[in-house]
Amino acid sequence: MTDSVVKDSAPEGLLETFWSYERALMADDLEALDRLFAPGDDSLRGDASGLIVGHEAISAFRHGRGGAPARTIGDIHVRDLGNDRALIVAVTLPASGGRGQQTQLWHRVTTNDGDAVWLIESAHLSVPAPAIVASIWRIVGSPLVTGAPDGPLVGETVAVKDLFDVAGFAVGAGVPAYLAESPRTVAHASAVTALLAAGAAVQGIAQTDEFAYSIAGKNSHYGTPPNAAVPGAIPGGSSSGPATAVASGQVSIGLGTDTGGSIRVPASYQGLWGLRTTHGAVARDGLLGLAPTFDTVGWMTRDAQTLRAAASASLASAGRGAAVAGFAVAPALVALATPGVQDAFAAALAQLAEAGLTDDLIEVTLPDIEDLHEIFRTLQSAEAWATHGDWIAAHPGGLSDEVAARFAFGATVDSETETFARLALELARERIASVVGDRVLLLPSASSIAPSTTADAETIEQVRQSTLRLTCVAGIAGRPALSVPKLTVNGAPVGLCLVGPPNTDLALIALGESLA
């Protein structure tokens, strides 16, 4: 810091306060940082990941990030704007190399004690872009795999969830110890081949929650990908890496999987289009699964047109059924969402009704939601242990405590309990089919907006449980489910979910586009 050169004269006390802030930043002195930022709802803090508004939100972001990267300060440029305001633009020199920039708008105010103090009203940080963000990507190329020279997806780029075989690369499944032992694959998974054959290029292999057994988007080994729509919030998972890669504009298509919401939840949290396909409509060879009864392949995009193109290139005869007949809503499902999401959902329904799009909407009563969730949880857990239990038993400590506990529960599900759950699944599926019929079931894609990265484990688990009760319905029914970026709560996105009859995947996208 002592080598910094101030290019302009500064108002009294400003530079001293600037250096106080810089020292607090490098020491991660959260109390001092909070004190030096202007209070209230109008303070601004921005960087490449987005804008955070309000002192409280900025403070929460700092508490959750675990400190700022080490840096020193180069040249400092000061502009006195008058009216007790000044602008500082400082060159930053990250310890990791390169150059960045810190821009701050300072305001001198008088405290209740009569002291004049400088506070930051707005700050923007630019840093050198990393070659690979490890929380998003496991490996990236330019591209990693080139697609066919002709086809409907030429010019599109794909982030492949680290569960699919990409020829020449190992599958890591979000678990470093598993990656270390995985052989290089010799052929692409069918879902990857379909996109390449249509002209898309694979940009890279993107991160996932450990063995895809989460909907939060956190990974204790590689970090939490940023939420490109809500700075400081979790991204949603388990297709977290592909979702963030799409939402941040790094690729146009995220190839993911959805067992219990792993496409719909990150799509909801980051304002994307996301499709969970009809169970079995897309081949799952070359895919490291979790629970075969519920595992599906799907995609996330920023617009409906790209989603439709990806789905059209990947769906064979399945998924191309005729248009659907009417809409349904289950009040018991909607009641699982937070009040803000319920209000946004109701407002969306009112808007659609006013436009004459939902004149045939009916209310339905599904089987008991707790029973549905227990069926899903029992079978998913038992199958997850059957899929990965041997590896997990041989690698104690290889997983985070949270994910390990879910697998541990799966190990306790005996054959009699699993058999009973399968019988209950068939009955529940028949009941849903008889109640909903060929209508599209409308519901929120997630129970809440994306929680903050600073939310405690109990809060995250509560959100997870509420959301799984929403998302498990499509899994139990084996039906396609589309998340449409239609709702907002306090500026944060929430998806409107359309659960359609089996094999109406493409028609569901067209319907979602008309509603959006």
Image: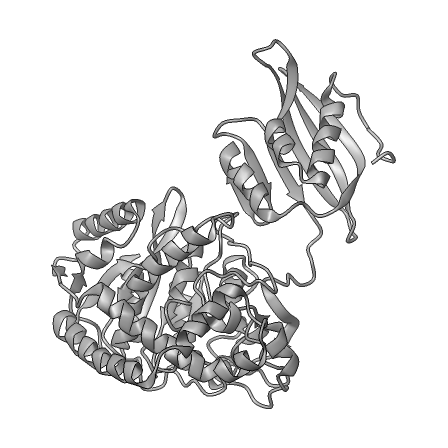
In the picture as drawn, the residue positioned furthest to the right comes out as 3
> Measured along the vertical axis of the image, is residue 167 above or below residue 22?
below
Place of residue 434 in the rendered image (x, y in percent of width and height, measured from the top left): 12, 75
Residue drawn 62% across and 70% down? 138
**Res 407 visible:** yes
Does residue 111 appear to the left or right of 214 in the view shown? right
Q: Where is residue 182 in the image (x, y as percent from the top left)?
A: 62, 83
**Which residue is situated farthest in the top direction here?**
114
Q: In the rendered view, does 122 fall on the left or right side of 358?
A: right
**As drawn, is 200 to the left or to the right of 494?**
right
* Residue placed furthest toward the bottom: 186
Q: Looking at the rendering, in which quadrant would you find the C terminus?
A: bottom left
Q: Which residue is drawn at 40% across and 61% down?
A: 265
Quadrant of res 202: bottom right
Q: Residue at x 53, y 78 (%)?
A: 392
185 w.r.t. 217: above or below: below
Where is residue 111 shown, x and y percent of the image?
Answer: 59, 14
